């Protein structure tokens, strides 16, 4: 029996999906700003971040209201907790994208970057992870959700390689150290975005199965 | 919606002088300024009940203490509070049912759409027609069929037109979300229905005389969860056309169905406001204690 307030659940899902789309757009545009040297994209990323922040506040308010007034249980209460956690992860992903965009603007002042090393590949993977986590939520696909944390190691490994290469570069070419430091931070931001995607995917598993798979064998990630 | 009733004073006893009929003015009296917890409605909100410094006594016992509250039209207002707090007494005062208790008296005023319910010459029967009531225990008349239960109010008021009665019967049962379940055996006894159906039958009976306001005194306390959900859905649908005031000891129900909630304790109105605010961020510590289950 569908109750008259169940449309509020559908509204919540829509807002969460929209927030996911905006976060993915923000990451994509920030990578464009960086790799295509198109700093005009940075302004778009910042505008998207404002929208992402507003959605975070809205979704939290919707969840608290629904929990208070509708007393959800089972799947519905899991949806509330997952929505509140996932929207925080998406908001942080948006912040990381903004950070990348701002660093891209600063990098442009130092001239063209000669080698991004693993950054382009990390950008592709981070976007893929975010998309897959959101797709798993939309499609209610547990298997798709479980693949996301299992791929996180690749992003972590690429970030570690970057760190070694970039620190070597600083030692060898101190004149470009400011630019190289920005690249280290960008690499870290992409690694964090992939972590946020992993966290969202784990929440999706909890939503669909009622099982908390964080820190378990099922989704084990390599320790730093 | 056609209303044969409003054009005829047939609710009054012919032996008595014609009662002052309660018309439907649009201007309501301002709320008393003395009650700190009286909520001030939005400027354009129409007021169904303007209760001013109301106290109700049963003999020497004061059951309601200086309550001032404005209940908006076209919405659901819930009254919550622990047992004995006076919520049912307050509800029953809104259609003068409390007068049926020997020794009952009151001070203060209750204005319904601007007119004093207890004004000189006001017929309580007329009041109870305009302000219908549904009780905790469903009470279909045991000797009457489903159809007769719904139409008893109209028949008692002299309505005989068969076509009109049949139309009103179907409309009322549809409004009570019961028509599809009973349309093929309207002549069966009303008491033959399930508990939830009986309660919806009583709602249909109340609606058949086209009240403006519906009072509900713990209408779901005797019902199972599915029947409760059906009644709640019905309440949600009814508020488009009616003002509903519901007393419930089920706080979760109050949170689900109402726009505004009034918390009573020991005869006093402790806090009144939007339901969302009462349950998410109550202003009074007693309200917080009650809604979070820390009372007692």
Image (cartoon, coloured by chain):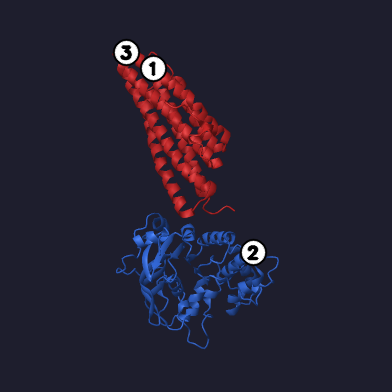
Can residue B123 be seen in the rendering of this structure? Answer: no
Q: Quadrant of the C terminus of chain A?
A: top left
The image shows residue B23 at horizontal and vertical percentages of 45, 74
The image shows residue A117 at horizontal and vertical percentages of 42, 16
Front tag of 3 and 2: 3
The label on residue A164 is 1
Q: Chain of mark 2?
A: B
Q: Answer few, some or many: residues within 10 Å of disc 3's Cα (few below 14, many 20 plus, some between 14 and 19).
A: few
The label on residue A138 is none
Question: As drawn, which residue projects farthest toward the bottom?
Answer: B15
Give me the chain that's blue: B
Q: Answer few, some or many: residues within 10 Å of disc 1's Cα (few below 14, many 20 plus, some between 14 and 19).
A: few
Residue drawn at (45%, 21%) of the image: A157
Question: As drawn, which residue projects farthest toward the right?
Answer: B184
> Mark 1 to mark 3: distance in Å?
11 Å
Mark 3: which secondary structure?
Answer: helix
User: Where is A95 relative to A83, above or below?
Assistant: above
Front tag of 1 and 2: 1
Give me the chain that's red: A
Q: Which residue is mark 3?
A: A171
User: Where is B17 relative to B250, above or below?
Assistant: below
Residue situated in front as seen by the camera: B159 or B52? B52
> Mark 1 to mark 2: distance in Å?
76 Å
Mark nearer the N terminus (1 vs 3): 1
The label on residue B179 is 2
Q: Answer few, some or many: residues within 10 Å of disc 2's Cα (few below 14, many 20 plus, some between 14 and 19).
A: some
């Amino acid at each position: 029996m569908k109750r008259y307030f169940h449309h509020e659940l559908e509204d919540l899902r829509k807002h969460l999906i929209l927030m996911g789309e905006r976060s993915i757009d923000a990451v994509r545009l920030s990578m464009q700003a960086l790799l295509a040297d198109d700093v005009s994209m940075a302004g778009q990323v910042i505008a998207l971040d404002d929208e992402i922040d507003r959605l975070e506040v809205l979704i939290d308010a919707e969840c608290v209201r629904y929990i208070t007034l509708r007393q959800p249980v089972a799947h519905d209460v899991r949806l509330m907790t997952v929505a509140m956690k996932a929207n925080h992860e998406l908001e942080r992903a948006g912040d990381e994208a903004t950070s990348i965009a701002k660093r891209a603007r600063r990098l442009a002042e130092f001239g063209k970057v000669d080698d991004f090393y693993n950054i382009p590949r990390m950008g592709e993977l981070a976007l893929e992870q975010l998309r897959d986590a959101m797709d798993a939520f939309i499609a209610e696909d547990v298997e798709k959700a479980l693949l996301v944390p299992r791929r996180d190691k690749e992003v972590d490994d690429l970030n570690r390689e970057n760190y070694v290469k970039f620190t070597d570069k600083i030692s060898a070419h101190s004149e470009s150290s400011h630019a190289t430091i920005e690249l280290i931070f960008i690499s870290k931001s992409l690694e964090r975005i992939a972590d946020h995607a992993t966290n969202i995917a784990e929440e999706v598993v909890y939503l669909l199965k009622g099982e908390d798979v964080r820190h378990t064998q099922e989704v084990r990630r390599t320790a730093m | 919606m056609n209303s044969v009733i409003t054009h005829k004073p047939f609710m009054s006893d012919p032996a008595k002088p014609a009662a002052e009929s309660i018309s439907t003015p649009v201007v309501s009296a301002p709320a008393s300024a003395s009650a700190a917890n009286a909520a001030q409605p939005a400027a354009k909100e129409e007021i169904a009940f303007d209760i001013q410094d109301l106290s109700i006594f049963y003999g020497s016992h004061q059951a309601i203490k200086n309550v001032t509250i404005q209940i908006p039209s076209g919405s659901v207002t819930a009254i919550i509070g622990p047992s004995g707090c006076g919520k049912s007494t307050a509800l029953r005062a809104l259609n003068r049912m409390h007068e049926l208790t020997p020794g009952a008296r009151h001070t203060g005023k209750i204005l319904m759409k601007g007119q004093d319910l207890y004004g000189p010459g006001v017929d309580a029967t007329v009041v109870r027609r305009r302000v219908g009531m549904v009780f905790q225990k469903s009470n279909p008349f045991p000797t009457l069929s489903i159809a007769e239960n719904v139409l008893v109010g109209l028949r008692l008021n002299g309505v005989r037109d068969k076509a009109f009665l049949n139309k009103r019967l179907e409309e009322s049962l549809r409004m009570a979300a019961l028509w599809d379940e009973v349309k093929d055996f309207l002549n069966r006894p009303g008491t033959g229905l399930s508990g939830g159906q009986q309660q919806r039958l009583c709602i249909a009976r109340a609606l058949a005389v086209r009240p403006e306001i519906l009072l509900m005194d713990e209408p779901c306390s005797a019902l199972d969860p599915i029947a409760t959900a059906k009644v709640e859905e019905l309440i949600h649908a009814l508020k488009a056309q009616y003002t509903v005031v519901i007393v419930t000891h089920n706080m979760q129900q109050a949170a689900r169905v109402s726009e505004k909630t009034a918390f009573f304790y020991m005869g006093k109105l402790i806090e009144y406001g939007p339901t969302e605010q009462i349950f998410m961020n109550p202003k009074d510590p007693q309200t917080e204690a009650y809604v979070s289950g820390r009372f007692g």
